[in-house]
Image: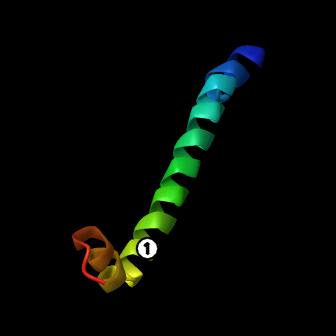
Amino acid sequence: MTTKQKKNSISKKDKNNLRITTLIAVVSFIIFKAIISDWEHFKAGLTGHF
């Protein structure tokens, strides 16, 4: 039973990597959503035309 459990369980390192990856994906999504929803303002800031 214990050998089966070890094969199916995710190690602590893999869980931490998955959490970090998920956090980065969520933060990136929020940032890109904000950029796309306010594209004209973002574009003006990049080019310097206010």
Point out the image quarter for the C terminus: bottom left
Residue at image coords 63%, 24% = 13
Query: Quick check: 17 left or right of 50?
Result: right
Describe the colour scheme in one phrase: rainbow
Q: Position of residue 12 (x, y in %)?
A: 69, 25
Does 22 sit above or below residue 6? below
Residue at image coords 26%, 73% = 48
To which residue does mark 1 refer? 33
Q: Quadrant of residue 45?
A: bottom left
Seen as rendered, the residue at the extreme right is 1
Query: Quick check: 4 left or right of 39?
Result: right
Does 13 sit above or below residue 47? above
Q: Secondary structure at mark 1?
A: helix
Query: Quick check: 8 left or right of 30?
Result: right
Does 28 sit above or below residue 42? above
Toward the viewer: 14 or 38? 38
Does 11 sit above or below residue 28? above
Residue at image coords 52%, 43% = 21
Q: Position of residue 15 (x, y in %)?
A: 64, 34
Q: Position of residue 23 (x, y in %)?
A: 58, 50
